[in-house]
Amino acid sequence: MKRLYLQIYFTIVVILVIAIMAIGLMGRFAFDTTRFDDMITVAGELAVNALPPPDAPRAQQQEAVQRLHDMLRIDLALYSERGVMLASAGRRLPPLELDGPVPRTRGHGNWLVPLSDGRFLVTSVPRGPWRPGKWVLVALLAVAFAVAVGAWPLVRRLTRRLERLKAGVEQLGEGDLGARVKIEGRDEIAALARSFNNSAERIEELVNSHKMLLANASHELRTPLTRINMALALAQTGIDARQRDNLKADIAELDQLIEEILLASRLDAARSAERSEEIDLLALAAEEAAPAGIDVEGTSVWVRGERALLRRMIRNLIDNARHHGGDSTPAITVGRLPDGRAHIEVRDHGPGVPASERERIFEPFYRLPGAAETGRGSGLGLALVRQIARHHGGQVQCRAATPGGSLFSIVMPASESAPQRAVEGETNSASPC
């Protein structure tokens, strides 16, 4: 991943390299060594004219050197062509060295001026106040320009992305649950935008789910309540056994619907299992299938989750298969996939679910066309199946079975190994007692 701090760091490094190269090039052209050598030659000719000849007495040469020192206010030392000091004035200067290929003198700021008569004049100009030349000012302006030009695109790129992210947050805060931001790059800002989109999607799902729940709850609750009111109205003339049984069934349906609504709300709010434990999915399925006389095939596979929720998930699948499967007994299979995940399949032998409706049947309160006229079922059973499966890190899918009917398949993470309390010698099938 390209980290944001690395982008900033390497950008600054590149800008500094460009600035140094610019300063170096300007310095290269700012100093003309040819003209400097010409200036040294001219200074040597002037010094020869101001000094006595080489064979003049040392006193006369000392007097001339002292006069130049007083006039120019620089340190001077005059040497013969053999390197012998003839005269000096001012601060003591490093000696002349003739042992190398060319004459030289040590020390920073000391200049060696060869004279045309063979003598050497060593001088040192005192360092005065620093007065930058035009080239220094130009170099500083070039550095400032390079930094400004190099930093502007990066700063604007970052601020534009932050501004778009800020606009998305404000749009979501104003009630637009469909607000999303474009993910650009692979740095921290991109990760923040991705997190925002995921959070906004989760919020939209929760709000839409609760809106749908509230919109349909009143309609679904009205039907059993109406039947109860009608039964109570007839209570004045007496209620026979059949009416009493119908009244109890309506009350039980109303109680189950309220329970499913509360469970759906709890699953929406919860992010993980509250009372997690190791559960044998095969044994749990056999327990739920036993009252209906359904055999469960497969092998034991252990999953971690809430027993009550997994039991409710399997029960809803069985009830759905029995309700839509006609007189045929549903088939239940439990096992482990090649990738190690646990799976449970419930197959019915009914008319099947049209391909266009296989996703919608998992929506809360949605029922296939014609199912609502039966007066039973709230449309929350399969919605709870999907919620419970996702609550345990799994997914549920509806497919067409061969030769007919529907196949509901749930895949979820399985435990690596069975607990110590597991019974050795697992059987390949489990049947009700």
Image (spheres, rainbow, N blue to C red):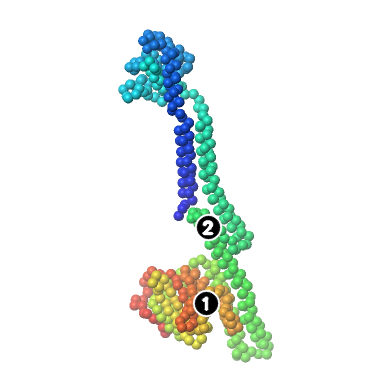
As measured in the structure, the alpha-carbon distance from the residue carrying label 2 to the one carrying label 1 is: 33 Å
Q: Residue 389 location in percent, x, y?
A: 49, 72
Disc 1 target residue: 355
Image quadrant in which the N terminus is located: bottom left
Residue appearing at x 39%, y 17% in the figure: 116
- Judge by depth and name the residue closer to the eye, 12 or 50: 50
Image quadrant in which the C terminus is located: bottom left
Residue 70 shows in the view: yes
Point out the tag, 2 or 1, that comes first from the N-terminus: 2
Disc 2 target residue: 183
Residue appearing at x 58%, y 76% in the figure: 365
Residue appearing at x 56%, y 58% in the figure: 181
Q: Residue 22 location in percent, x, y?
A: 48, 38
Identify residue type, mark 2: Ile
In the image as oriented, which residue stretches furthest toward the left? 99
Secondary structure beneath dot 1 equals helix
Q: Is residue 177 above or below residue 155?
A: below
Residue 289 shows in the view: no
